[in-house]
Image: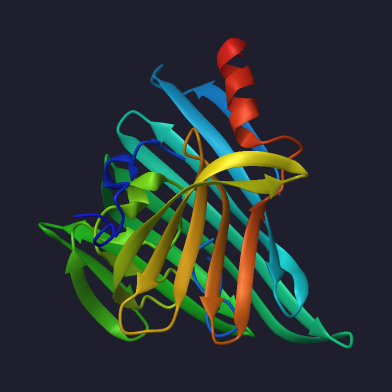
Amino acid sequence: MGLAKIISSSERRACAAKSGKNAGNHLLVQVLGACFATVLFVSPDGAAAAQYRLDYKASHSIYGDIGTYTNVIETDGDTTTVTTALDIKVSILGVVAYRRSAHRVETWMGDRLVRFQGTSLLDGKTIVLSGAAQGDEFVLTSPSGKVSAPASIRVANPWTTNNLKGDTIFSPDDGAIRKARLTDAGEMSVTIQAQNIRVHEYDIGLIGTAKHYQVWFDAVGTPVMFRVFDSDGICTFTLNGPRPPDVLLAERARNPP
């Protein structure tokens, strides 16, 4: 089942792109920031591993530019590690009215989340989350206690199109687990760094809430932009690289290191 039911005649194309995987609570929310780079290296056992970085600029519909969001994705064999850093600050008349920072690490084995560790700092308050796969469940520990979720649970962090699978999602900021519904909005163009990029849009609604997200993936599955809607406005995270990431990947393929 997709990150819920895909509501579109484009269902066959919903996962055509392969890999590519939030910010806030109250003012913002949890989904996904600045330059894009790809690095290949050799792991200690000699196996080839790959690492790339996705940096986003965060802007709010009311407060303008408010910070950055970064995902570093490292793949080694069947294991993928996603390290996320968030730094958000809202100032009004020179006074900081809202501040959030976070550091999170997701570990995936194939298509399954097997470990999560995250620390968020919101206006001086620290929230620590940890989770691990146990049998056919994923057990998440938060300040509210332990809760079990389906093994197919996804993190609200759209670093890959694979995160569109499953119908259960959790916030990496506060650990809230919700059902979600995915709508395939089809193909279109967006402007990133003054260049038009062909993308595929997906809309993700959290069932039982007014909160929802949009995410745009390019032709090679890179999330070039995502947007969070809530009662405080719209927060947009835009990949802020010198050139579209699909161009960078194409050049890397032609001229490997």
Q: Is residue 226 left or right of residue 180?
A: right
Q: In this view, does 31 lie to the left or right of 190?
A: left
Q: Pick the residue in front: 57 or 105.
A: 57
Q: Pick the residue in front: 251 or 44.
A: 251
Residue ranking furthest to the left: 135
Residue ranking furthest to the front: 9
Residue 64 in percent (x, y) is at: 77, 72
| Residue 234 visible here | yes
Question: Residue 145 falls in which quadrant of the image?
Answer: bottom left
Query: Residue sitting at 74 percent across and 79 percent down?
Result: 90
Residue 122 in percent (x, y) is at: 59, 81
Quarter in which the N terminus is drawn: bottom left
Query: Residue sitting at 55 percent across and 85 percent down?
Result: 26
Residue ranking furthest to the top: 255
Quarter in which the C terminus is drawn: top right
Total marks shown come to 0
Height in image: 110 above or below 8?
Answer: above
* Colour scheme of the picture: rainbow
Residue 159 in percent (x, y) is at: 47, 49
Residue 134 in percent (x, y) is at: 15, 59
Height in image: 30 above or below 232?
Answer: above
Height in image: 31 above or below 222?
Answer: below
Query: Residue sitting at 58 percent across and 77 percent down?
Result: 28
Q: Pick the residue in front: 183 or 160.
A: 183
| Residue 33 visible here | no
Question: Residue 209 falls in which quadrant of the image?
Answer: bottom left
Question: Residue 207 falls in which quadrant of the image?
Answer: bottom left
